[in-house]
Image: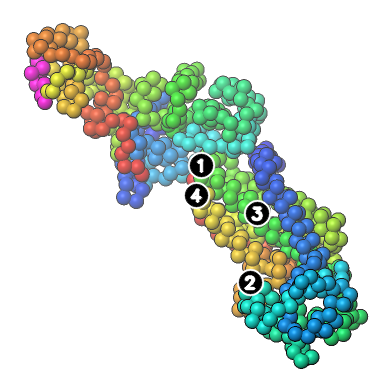
């Protein structure tokens, strides 16, 4: 399988901040990759370098065997982008805006109708872009990104700031684009659900570096994956070490919230043991929840912070 | 013509046409301003001036109030001088004491004190106060002979075409409109699009940068011509302003002025992505030229050192040359240095601006 994108040892500094620090990444054609990390992790800077907007201080980026230095015009035709902020000309309608961009790619007006239909904005084609909701604006941005039938689609936080309904609409469009058109896509996000739902491979980033990458299953399995029993107790316990047993992989206790987490290999096997311990110690459980480990749990294990935290911005 | 260029022109026109504020400020405001200023400086309205009179001689007062166009109410004598051509001046003469007259002068209520003492009339006023001087000239003549100085045969009022205020104003206003239209229309739009990351989005397509710039300037040039025609049409129809030189020379000069300000607009909008900073930058360029370049009043009253600097401003040379074609009938040859100067400055500013221009 040939690669649509190859990134080799790419670095980018802004004054004293290392926004991207020695990143290596290969994306085969047709793959949908998520760059997952908190704000300031370096995702957008990396995407901007792929888009040709930023120039790396060091390293190489190759898209379909071409680079920005020598194949600028060709690459503009081969990639589609959706920026993190999408402000268009307020006094133009959806159709006029998409048609303008179609003309910049030298595409016929028939293509305008096609992409407007793909993002389900037919009813809004005559609406001024200033009158669109956040989700509709994002769909229009997607329509523009899809105009040139790009080989690689770069989506920088396409659902940030959208309500859950609008977010799911975008997910559906992206999902069908990937399945039906086999597009290669790179999406940056700090929503783990988005990465889990849409992408076949997840690249976790923090402080300009790639921490881990793989499918969701690979990522969760790679770190001695566990399932988690979450619980809260009535009372004032400073320590719950008495709840540890052989099957406990990790035990954490939050004194302030009287809330604990026990990581186990299998909830089915270990939950009865935990409940027996609770009964034996005459404890009152105010909350009990069993769940699989998430990317956020994994991120906390690796960095000590949540995915939705903000690290030092470039 | 590439479809992308035509689309870029089309969207610039649409954006302009769908913004009622832009249409008002571009088309109606200059016309209203030209009309308002033309009216204000073309027709003389009645002027009122106050004068203090110190006089113990009742015969003198009776003599004055018995004259034509004079009336008295209590201790205020009203004298109306002049006519509709020269402008009418209504003098309110306060018959009062020395102490009171001095107080009125100090407070600026009056600019002239007339004293009649033992049959001898003296006029007291500040020699640097124009109002005092004018009042003296008119009233001295009237008191002495009963003759209104402005009705004398030897005074003739200038009203011929070419030397009226409106003839001075219109060419300057046309030049100023080009400056405002280009600076606000191009610079502000560019800065706003950069701040919204729209420029970044557009250059991420195969769009050629010259196409974007070319379409924006082409649209603005057409709009400037239409704006200029609207202002000139009013001046022609209402004030009978005409062009003594050739239309072709005006067109060449207009185009050179446009190129000059287009260059400045590129330079002004080349870096900033902040509309507040952009606003300040544009004002910093527009305001000094608007005030100093002699659009509304001659800049020759400024000190010589300042005049030398003022003459270097693009709007000054543009407005002066426009005026010379409109009023003096200057030909293309005599305005060629200005045309070349404006064009060259525009090209230099464009070159520098595009060199440092930030698309992202």
On whether residue B74 falls in the magenta region, the answer is no
Residue highlighted by disc 1: B197
Image-based side of B44 in relation to A246, left or right: right
| Start-end of magenta stretch | A238-245
User: Looking at the image, can residue B295 be seen?
Assistant: yes
Image-based side of B285 in relation to B254, left or right: left
Under circle 3, the secondary element is: helix
Dot 3, how many residues are within 10 Å of its Cα: few (below 14), some (14-19), or many (20+)? Answer: many
| Same subunit, tags 1 and 3 | yes
Under circle 4, the secondary element is: loop
| Same subunit, tags 3 and 4 | yes
Q: Earlier in the sequence, mark 1 or mark 4?
A: 1
Residue highlighted by disc 3: B182
Residue highlighted by disc 2: B310
Dot 4, how many residues are within 10 Å of its Cα: few (below 14), some (14-19), or many (20+)? Answer: some
Q: Earlier in the sequence, mark 2 or mark 1?
A: 1
B161 relative to A237, above or below:
below
């Amino acid at each position: 399988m040939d690669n649509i994108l190859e990134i080799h040892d790419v670095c980018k500094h802004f004054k004293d901040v290392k926004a991207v620090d020695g990143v290596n990444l290969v994306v085969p054609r047709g793959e949908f990759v998520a760059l997952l990390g908190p704000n300031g992790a370096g995702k957008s800077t990396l995407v901007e370098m792929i888009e040709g907007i930023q120039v790396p201080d060091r390293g190489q980026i190759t898209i379909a065997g071409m680079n920005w230095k020598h194949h600028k015009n060709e690459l503009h035709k081969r990639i589609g982008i959706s920026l993190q902020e999408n402000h268009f000309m307020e006094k133009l309608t959806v159709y006029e805006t998409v048609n303008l961009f179609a003309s910049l790619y030298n595409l016929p007006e028939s293509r305008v109708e096609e992409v407007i239909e793909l993002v389900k904005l037919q009813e809004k084609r005559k609406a001024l872009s200033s009158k669109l909701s956040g989700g509709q604006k994002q769909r229009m941005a997607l329509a523009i990104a899809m105009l040139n039938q790009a080989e690689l689609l770069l989506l920088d936080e396409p659902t940030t700031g959208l309500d859950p309904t609008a977010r799911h609409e975008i997910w559906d469009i992206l999902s069908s684009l990937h399945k039906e058109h086999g597009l290669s896509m790179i999406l940056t996000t700090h929503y783990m659900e988005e990465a889990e739902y849409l992408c076949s491979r997840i690249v976790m980033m923090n402080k300009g570096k790639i921490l881990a990458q793989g499918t969701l299953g690979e990522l969760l399995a790679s770190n001695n994956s566990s399932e988690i029993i979450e619980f809260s107790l009535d009372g004032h316990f400073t320590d719950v070490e008495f709840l540890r047993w052989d099957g406990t992989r990790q035990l954490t206790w939050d004194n302030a919230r009287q809330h604990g987490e026990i990581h186990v290999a299998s909830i089915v096997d270990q939950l009865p043991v935990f409940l027996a311990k609770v009964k034996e110690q005459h404890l009152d459980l105010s909350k009990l929840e069993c769940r699989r480990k998430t990317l956020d749990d994994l991120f906390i294990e690796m960095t000590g912070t949540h995915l939705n935290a903000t690290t030092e911005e470039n | 013509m590439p479809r992308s260029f035509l689309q870029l022109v089309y969207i610039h026109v649409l954006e302009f046409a769908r913004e009622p504020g832009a249409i008002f400020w571009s088309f109606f405001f200059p016309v209203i301003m030209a009309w308002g200023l033309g009216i204000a400086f073309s027709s003389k309205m009645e002027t009122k001036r106050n004068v203090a009179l110190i006089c113990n001689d009742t015969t003198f007062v009776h003599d004055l109030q018995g004259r034509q166009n004079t009336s008295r109410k209590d201790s205020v004598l009203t004298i109306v001088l002049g006519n509709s051509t020269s402008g009418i001046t209504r003098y309110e003469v306060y018959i009062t004491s020395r102490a009171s007259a001095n107080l009125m002068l100090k407070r600026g209520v009056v600019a002239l004190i007339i004293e009649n003492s033992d049959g001898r009339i003296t006029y007291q006023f500040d020699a640097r106060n124009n109002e005092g001087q004018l009042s003296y000239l008119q009233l001295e003549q009237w008191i002495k002979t009963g003759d209104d100085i402005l009705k004398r045969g030897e005074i003739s009022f200038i009203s011929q075409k070419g030397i009226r205020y409106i003839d001075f104003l219109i060419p300057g206003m046309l030049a100023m409109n080009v400056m405002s239209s280009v600076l606000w229309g191009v610079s502000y739009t560019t800065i706003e699009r950069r701040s919204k990351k729209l420029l970044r989005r557009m250059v991420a397509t195969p769009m050629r940068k010259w196409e974007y710039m070319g379409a924006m300037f082409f649209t603005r040039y057409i709009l400037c011509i239409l704006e200029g025609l609207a202002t000139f049409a009013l001046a022609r129809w209402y004030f009978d302003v005409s062009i003594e030189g050739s239309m072709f020379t005006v067109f060449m000069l207009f185009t050179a002025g446009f190129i000059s300000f287009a260059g400045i607009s590129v330079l002004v909008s080349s870096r900033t992505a902040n509309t507040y900073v952009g606003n300040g930058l544009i004002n910093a360029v527009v305001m000094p030229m608007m005030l100093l370049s002699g659009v509304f009043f001659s800049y020759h009253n400024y000190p010589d050192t300042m005049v030398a600097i003022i003459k270097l401003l693009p709007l000054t040379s543009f407005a002066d040359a426009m005026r010379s074609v409109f009023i003096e009938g200057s030909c293309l040859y005599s305005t060629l240095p200005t045309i070349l100067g404006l064009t060259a400055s525009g090209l230099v500013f464009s070159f520098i601006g595009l060199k440092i221009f930030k698309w992202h």
